[in-house]
Image: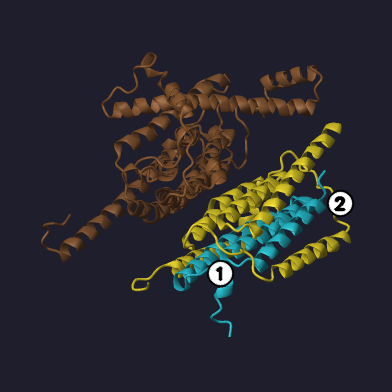
Chain colours: A brown, B cyan, C yellow
Amino acid sequence: MDSFFSNPVTDWLSGVFTGWGMNPDAAHVLTAFIAILLLITVVMVLDIFLVWTERKIVARFQDRIGPNRLGPFGLIQPFADIIKLIIKENIYPKGVDKIVYNLAPVIMMMSVLLLWAVFPLSPILFGVDLNVGVLYLIGVGSLGTLSIIMAGWSSNNKYALLGAFRQVAVMISYEIPMVVALLIPTILSGSMGINDIVWAQDVWYIVLVPLGFILFLISATAELGRAPFDLTEAESELIAGHHIEYSGMKFGLFYASELLHTFTFGGFIAAFFFGGWRGPGAETYPILGLFYFLIKATIGYWLFGWIKYTLPRIRIDKMMDLNWKFLVPFSFALLVFVALTNALLADFVGSWIYWVGMLLSNLLFGWVTMEILRRRARGEREKVEGVQPVAEGGH
Amino acid sequence: MIPLSWYLILSAALFAIGLFGVLSRKNAIAILLGIELMLNAVNINLVSFWRYNDPTRIDGQVFAVIVFAVAAAEVAVGLALVISVYRRRNTVVADEIDLMKW
Amino acid sequence: MECREKIMTAMQIIFGITAAVMVGSAIMVVTTKNLIHAALWLIVTLFGAAVLFATLNAGFIAVIQVVVYIGAIAILFIFAIMLTRREKGDTGPGLNRGWWLSAVIAVVVFGGLTWLLQGWDGLSKAAPALGPSFDSVGLLAETLVSPEAFVLPFEVASVLLLAALVGAVYIAFQRKGEE
């Protein structure tokens, strides 16, 4: 199987290195190193433009124009931002634990960049085809959790610590529905490798399991710490959460990694639910696959932006309630339900009966859930209104 | 080739270090940290025995998975106990929690 | 064959570095005064263990090691450490008076274990080669839930986790009216 480390280009490159009289193994390692460096560079340049995209998106949602002065459409603006961040003074607050303090943004960025190792950009272009790719995604995500708590603790600031506490509690809690949501494509495709999941999607999984997609979208939003779950920012209460004491490029790393993390998760949404790099002609011309994938990833990214700039922030206890009292039981029930329907329809895999059956059963499940929630809400409302017949001042 | 003995010796070293931590640390949470080291040493042993014995019999990995479950359970209950003790007695030093010593 | 030798040497180098880092950070775990630092050093050790699992072709265990230990257990430790301290710094010695005795015991245990291992003939055994289609993840999955193998221990483990969950919540829960 081709990958970053063995495809025509890298073979040619290591051929060149061996031609210069280099040891073949060393040439292989060097080529792999260059491939990784190239990927990271491309990703970081992409990140610069994500800053611009983000500002443009938020401007459109708020009926503004956004950056439009520097260069065409304000495209030079992010570079000016970066220059400003780099030449800013590095401030160490009193009582900072220097090593941990400096390590935290690096680990944050690392946790995002590591995700790109399993990113199936096109049928032949990916870092490694791990057979536990889905779990790898969760494992790397836990490094991000770690960096948040490191940043919050080492800053020697109670607001930073409180923000980190909240955010980590949220991330750990929402990891459960996210893992379960990721198990649904795993069950349908029969593999935990992300590329295998893409190959299995003759019909996009968003059509087969729309509920799984919604579950993943909600839990991923919480995992990313984006609004309406952006308790780590919470400008009005916690000022900026865990990165309050960071300035200059260290803050820049947090900011950049948040945007890149969002884009990466948009890519994973594309890979798990939008059919990844698949599209007309993608198998024959892999470069088309890359093109399709980036378009789908951008749609995923835009979805996160849409949610972020539309919904207000949720209070922390409401958020935990939503997770533990609704999403966790719901996700387990959905997982069992999808596994059962998948087993029942196993004879029809690949035909339209399977697709329609999965879709209809999912819609039925969603309808039943909504009905149960409506009953409960009505019951609670009647209970409250029964106790206090006078409804005035009820809010 | 890495001989099996390297893994076993490393895991023995980790186990001994963890044991030292369990026996000599004052803070109850630090004692739990030592226990984690010991459990990890056991896991390295289990997985390396699986690899070097007969990889088609996956028992070693199964045991490792169950050790993970036990470690998670142990940490959850252990830390809950420590927090509960801290609430009542305002200390986490194991030597000072000696009410039942008599 | 020569290439294979070299890859093996590379593996030995990786093992050596990982082992050195693991032992060093494990020693830091048990000796550092600052408990948060101890927990962070523990994370380094656990990460080293994940690398070792990867060198042993146990990818699933390696990833689970990161998810469970670093993502859950280490974070839980850091939370607990922060919840059980009055001020930021740790005061006083981290070790008790009899620490030298514990050190002797640890060295004796290590020496005894290595001495025991010395007499065993399975030590220098080479790892059996794995076929290209060998899939330890699939095998593990089937073994864990197959009735002939480990389905009962697996279920017992899940019951244990549930019991631990309930127990931890019950123990750490601050009841009303209690200070």
- Is residue C176 rendered to the left or right of residue A129? left
Residue C55 is situated, as x and y percent measured from the top left of the image, at: 72, 44
**In the displayed structure, would residue B92 be above or below residue A211?**
below
What residue sits right under mark 1 in the picture?
Answer: B93
For residue B42, what is the image quadrant?
Answer: bottom right
As drawn, is B61 to the left or to the right of A47? right
Q: Which mark is residue C124?
A: 2
Residue A54 in the image: state x and y as whole percent: 39, 28
Chain ID of residue with mark 1: B
Q: CA distance from mark 1 to mark 2?
A: 44 Å
Location of residue A296 in the rendering, given as x and y in whole percent from the top left corner? 45, 28
Quarter of the C terminus of chain B within the rendering: bottom right
Q: Nearer the viewer, residue A357 or B10?
A: B10
Vertical relation: A82 (above or below) A340: above
Three-letter code, disc 1: Val
Spot occupied by residue A152 in the image (x, y as percentages of width and height): 46, 48
Mark 1: secondary structure: loop
In the image, residue B49 sits, relative to residue C133, either above or below, namely below
Q: Is residue B62 visible?
A: no
Farthest-out residue, bottom: B102
Q: Nearer the viewer, residue A160 or C48?
A: A160
Q: Nearer the viewer, residue A218 or B79?
A: B79
Q: On the picture, is A335 further left or further right than C1?
A: left
